[in-house]
C-alpha cells in the first residue's frame, strides 16, 4: 500500500508548492480536499486521520487545532507553521542541523519544519557554536531580505494587486521593527545562544528568494580564527550534504554581488563566507528560496526521510 499524504492548507502558498512537488510521485497517494471545502473541519479531520503523514500548511492557530484533531491517532505530522518549533515533543525538521538530526526526523511522529529565516541563520551560526569558535554569549545579528511570498496569500495580494485596500507600494521595506519577530525563539534555541539575536528582516518586490546575513567580528571568536578557518568549519559541518552547499572561497571572492533570487524555484541553500584575506570581519551569508529549503522543499525532504526514502 502506498503511504497516504494529506496537505492541510494545500490551497495556500506553501501547500500549493508541496502539492506541485508531489504531483509526479507515483509512490504516494495524495489525499486532497476541494478548495471550497478547505475550512470544513469535519472533512479535514477525516482526511487528517486517514493519512499516514499530514503536512500542515496553516496559520499557527489552525495548526494547533489540527494537532488536537489528531490526538489519539497514529498519523505522523509535519507542521510548517511556527506553532511547535521550540516544543520539546517535536523534532526540529532541519536535517543538516547536526549529525543525528536526519535520523531523528526519520523516526519522529512530530516534526516541526524550520522557519525560512531561521533555516539560513541557524545554518551559519550552529557550525561555529558546535566547533567552539563562537561562544554562546556572542552578540549575534541577523539581517535578511525575503521575497514577498514569505507573507503568504495575504502579502502576495497586497504586493501584486494595486487595488487592494492595503496595497504595499514599497519595493523594499524593513519590518519587525520591535525586534520581537516570531522566528527569534528557534534561532536562539537551535543556534545554542544565550541571547536572542538582533534580527532585521525585510521584504523585496520579488516573489521567491532570500538572503540571510550574519556579520561576525573574527577577533570576538575563540582563538581569533581567519576567514579560511571559519570556512573550513562550515565545509566540515556540511560535508557530504547535497542540499546545503558551502561555496568555495575562490568562487565567492570573485563575486561582486549576491542575488536574492539566485536559488528561486530550487530546494537548495548556498552558504558563503565573504571578507578579505587578513581582514578582521566576515559576513556569513545564506541564500535560499523562502518557499524551497525555507518551507515546501524542506517539508518534502522531511517527508521523504520519514518514509525512509532518503
Ligand atoms: N510562505 C512562506 O514562505 C512560508 C510559510 N511558512 C508557514 O506555512 C504556513 C502557511 O503559510 P502560507 O502558505 O504562506 O499561508 P497562506 O495564507 O498562503 O495559506 C494558508 C492556507 O491555510 C488556509 N487556512 C487558514 N486558516 C484555516 C483553518 N482554520 N482551517 C483550514 N484552513 C485554513 C488558508 O485558507 P484561506 O484562503 O481561506 O485563508 C490558506 O489556504 C504558515 O504557518 C507559515 O508561517 C513557513 C515558511 C515559509
Ligand atoms: C516576508 C514575511 O512576511 N515572512 C514571514 C515569515 C515567513 C513565514 O510565515 O514563515 P514561518 O512559518 O517560517 O514563520 C514573516 O516575517 O512573518
Image (cartoon, rainbow, N blue to C red):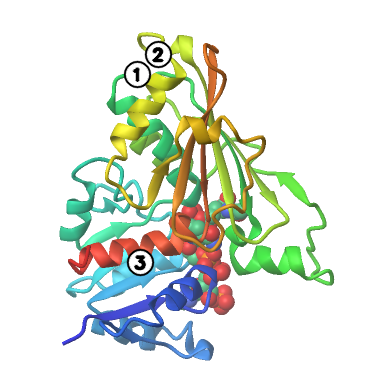
Q: Where 187 sits versus 269, above or below?
A: above
For residue 1, side relative to residue 184 (left or right): left
Q: Is residue 32 left or right of residue 275?
A: left
Q: Is residue 305 visible?
A: yes
Q: Please provide percent x and percent y for residue 92.
A: 30, 50
For residue 167, the mark is none
Q: Tell me where residue 95 appears, x and y as whole percent.
A: 29, 50
At a point 15% along the width and 59% down the height, the residue shown is 107
Determine which residue is flagged by label 1: 133
Residues under numbered marks 1 and 2 in contact, where contact means CB atoms less than 8 Å apart: yes
| Secondary structure of the residue carrying numbered label 2 | loop
Q: Earlier in the sequence, mark 1 or mark 3?
A: 1
Q: Residue at x 78, y 58 (%)?
A: 168
Which residue is the site of mark 2?
225
Residue indicated by mark 3:
300
Question: Above or below — where is 272 with respect to 159?
Answer: above
Nearest the viewer among 31 and 277 is 277
Percent x, y for residue 273? 49, 30
**Residue at image point 27% right, 82% down:** 28
Amino acid at each position: 500500500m502506498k503511504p497516504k499524504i494529506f496537505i492541510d492548507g494545500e490551497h495556500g502558498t506553501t501547500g500549493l508548492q508541496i502539492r506541485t512537488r508531489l504531483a509526479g510521485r507515483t509512490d504516494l497517494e495524495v489525499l486532497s480536499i476541494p478548495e471550497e471545502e478547505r475550512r470544513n473541519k469535519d472533512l479535514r479531520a477525516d482526511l487528517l486521520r486517514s493519512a499516514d503523514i499530514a503536512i500542515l500548511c496553516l496559520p499557527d492557530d489552525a495548526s494547533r487545532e489540527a494537532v488536537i484533531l489528531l490526538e489519539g491517532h497514529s498519523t505522523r505530522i509535519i507542521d510548517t507553521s511556527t506553532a511547535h518549533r521550540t516544543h520539546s515533543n517535536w523534532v526540529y525538521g532541519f536535517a543538516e542541523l547536526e549529525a543525528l538530526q536526519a535520523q531523528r526526523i526519520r523516526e519522529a511522529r512530530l516534526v516541526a519544519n524550520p522557519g525560512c529565516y531561521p533555516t539560513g541563520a541557524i545554518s551559519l551560526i550552529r557550525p561555529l557554536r558546535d566547533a567552539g569558535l563562537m561562544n554562546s554569549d556572542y552578540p549575534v545579528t541577523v539581517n535578511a531580505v525575503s521575497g514577498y511570498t514569505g507573507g503568504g496569500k495575504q502579502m502576495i495580494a497586497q504586493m501584486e494587486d494595486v487595488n487592494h485596500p492595503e496595497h504595499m507600494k514599497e519595493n523594499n521595506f524593513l519590518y519587525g521593527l520591535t525586534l520581537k519577530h516570531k522566528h527569534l525563539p528557534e534561532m536562539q534555541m537551535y543556534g545554542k545562544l544565550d541571547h536572542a539575536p538582533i534580527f532585521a528582516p525585510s521584504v523585496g518586490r520579488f516573489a521567491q528568494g532570500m538572503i540571510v546575513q550574519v556579520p561576525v567580528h573574527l577577533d570576538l571568536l575563540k582563538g581569533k580564527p581567519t576567514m579560511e578557518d571559519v570556512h573550513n568549519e562550515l565545509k566540515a559541518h556540511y560535508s557530504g550534504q547535497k542540499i546545503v552547499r558551502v561555496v568555495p572561497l575562490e568562487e565567492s571572492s570573485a563575486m561582486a554581488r549576491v542575488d536574492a533570487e539566485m536559488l528561486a524555484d530550487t530546494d537548495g541553500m548556498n552558504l558563503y563566507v565573504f571578507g578579505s584575506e587578513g581582514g578582521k570581519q566576515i559576513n556569513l551569508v545564506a541564500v535560499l528560496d523562502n518557499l524551497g529549503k525555507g518551507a515546501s522543499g524542506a517539508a518534502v525532504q522531511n517527508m521523504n526521510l520519514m518514509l525512509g526514502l532518503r
